[in-house]
Image (tube, helix red, strand yellow):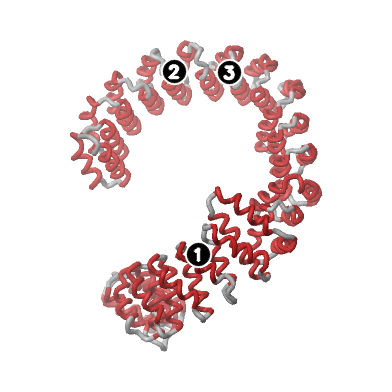
Amino acid sequence: MEIEAQQSLKELQDKNPEVRLHAIEKLARYKDPKYTTYLIDMMGDPEWRVRKTAVVAVTGLERNEALVEQLIQALYQEGNVGKRNAAEEALNHIGPISIFPLLAHVRTANKDVKKMIIEVLGEIADAGAVPDLVKLLSDPDENVRLAAIESLGKHRDPRAVESLIPLLQNDNTLVCFTTVKALERLGDQRAVDPLIRIAGRKGVERVVLEALGTFAYPAVLDPILTGLREGTARIKESALKALVDHSERAPVERHGEILDRLRSNYDPKTAVFLTESLDHPDEKTQRAAVKVLGWMEDSTAAARIVKMIDGPFREEALEALRRMKQSTMDVLLQTMVTANEVTREGIAQLLGDAGTRRSVNALIHLLADPNGHVRQTAAQSLGRIQDPLAAKAVLDLLEDEYVSVQESAIQALSLLKNPEILSRLMNLLESKKARLRCNAIKVLGKMNAADALPKLSFCLKDEDPAVRRAAVEALSEFRTAAALPGLVIALADEDSTVRLAALSAVARHREVDFIRHIDPLLTDESIWVRSAVAKALGERKDESAKTLLLGMLKDRVGAVQIAAMEAMGRFRDRGFSDPIFEMTTSPDPDVVKSAITVLGEIGDPSVARRIQVFLNHTNWGIRAAAAQSLGRLGDTAARESIEKLAKDDPDRLVQQTAQLALAQLATKP
């Protein structure tokens, strides 16, 4: 290894940067401090990739004050800017351990090194540096003072606020500007009034307004609105962004007050400025303009905002247009003709929000749009408007090429509830297309159309299982005795998915003799049907279900056994404890885990000792289940064993479960 390392040291001097780069990587793997000096020297390499690799290598070494001191010394090497910058970057990565050595040097270093150290302190942002940084605010060198101001802002330590505020009055505009940014970062209320007092100061107007916007306090609104109304174009831009920032930070209960104040300051010049700002190159300004125009319900810019639906501020544009309400209708209808599909979809949403007769007619037109998303949104909007006259047009979408559009049509038709379409829907039950029969069935179910019950029941004999399943789900919507005979018949359907749907529907009818009807399903060929039976028995909690659930513990499939045990757990019957504990002998670890978990849910303390043995099981899931159940059972006798799991178990999840169990046991004497 020593020979290889020596070869790598020679390669550090190679003319080929690739060779030097790989040599650094090889030396870094040793993590040996004796190579530190060489690696730090390579941070001054003329090739930037080599310098970057050296920084990574150095920061991967053991972090101690000796390493920090060597990096600080690199800051003093004035002839190699690359090395100084790389050393600064490395110190940033090393973090808080650097603080005390850095502070020792910042008191004595020359102004250039002092500035670099202050920048590092700002990136590390350790509170221990704040007192020294405050002292540096009075350093004779301007660059040092500016660096200290910026660094204090990054620390976000409230102790710095009182020292920074007087600097807002400094004659040097750059000092004032940097202080404003620092106070903005700090976000301390004490800075609000001093910032307001300099809001009109030349050279910092914009930065002050943007800083004030980050505060939620009511007092900032006056200078922001003044800037929006009276400022130059650039100041108005800052005021606009500040207004939106302030509104988004202010409590909800103040939003009405903010809008009222804005309305009282809103004039035609402001409206023109906002409209022009929609084309501003700065996206934050664009977004703010859209929002404020929406707040003012100013429809003069509606045509421009509609075009922004297909852009990064889609949601803001839609919300603004919603606020403008009926005044945008003509614009929406005109734009709809030539707009792209993204914009047409947004217009379909807005037409649904408007909910007028003109909206309905336009949405009916969009039901034939070539884009599926537009058709889907148009159907959804018509459903929200609930105009029965739209039902016939929506009906055609039941045969759309996209399932998502069909589903939207089904939902819309169920909301429209136009009795005039019942005959057409029942005619569709005779369609040769299974999907169309399914969709018609779904609508009839959601409409609770009593006249359709006989036909829906007849659909239980359809050749397609998907249609039969849809018929079952439709009949389950009625919740009347008239639908029950068909549902009971469907329990014996040849398709397991139909039987599952029927089982779920019948279980919801409390008046049914559930046990009598589901007896054949206890031995159903589908494990999912048998599992669903167990779940239904647990949900109903009939006493007569207990014997059936005990029998299901003997099922040949673990998933069914687990479903049966989980159902038994819902009874909280300690009489189940012994038969469930017998399931811990299963070769299936999931069954064992479920049995232990359910025993904890039942709450029978007599099984606690028997569960303790599973704390040492080889399966992590079983150990976790045992710890969880013993915690629920309050078994203080297991505390020592659970503490061992919490401390030493190789699985992190087991440790966490054991810690939760100990927290439960802590409440026990």
In the image: residue 652, left or right of residue 167:
left
Task: Return the residue at label 2.
Answer: 523
> Which amino acid type is shown beneath numbered disc 2?
Thr
Image coordinates of residue 638 in percent, x first then y, are 20, 35
Task: Return the residue at label 3.
Answer: 479
Task: Return the residue at label 1.
Answer: 192
Image coordinates of residue 642 in percent, x first then y, are 23, 40
Q: Which class describes the residues within 10 Å of circle 1: few (<14), some (14-19), or many (20+)?
A: many
Image coordinates of residue 384 in percent, x first then y, are 68, 35
Q: How many marks?
A: 3
Local secondary structure at mark 2: helix
In the image: residue 652, left or right of residue 226:
left
Does residue 596 lie above or below 75 as drawn?
Answer: above
Q: Which class describes the residues within 10 Å of circle 2: few (<14), some (14-19), or many (20+)?
A: few
Q: Which class describes the residues within 10 Å of circle 3: few (<14), some (14-19), or many (20+)?
A: some
> Which amino acid type is shown beneath numbered disc 3?
Arg
Q: Nearer the viewer, mark 3 or mark 2?
A: 3
In the image: residue 616, left or right of residue 523:
left
In the image: residue 338, left or right of residue 232:
right
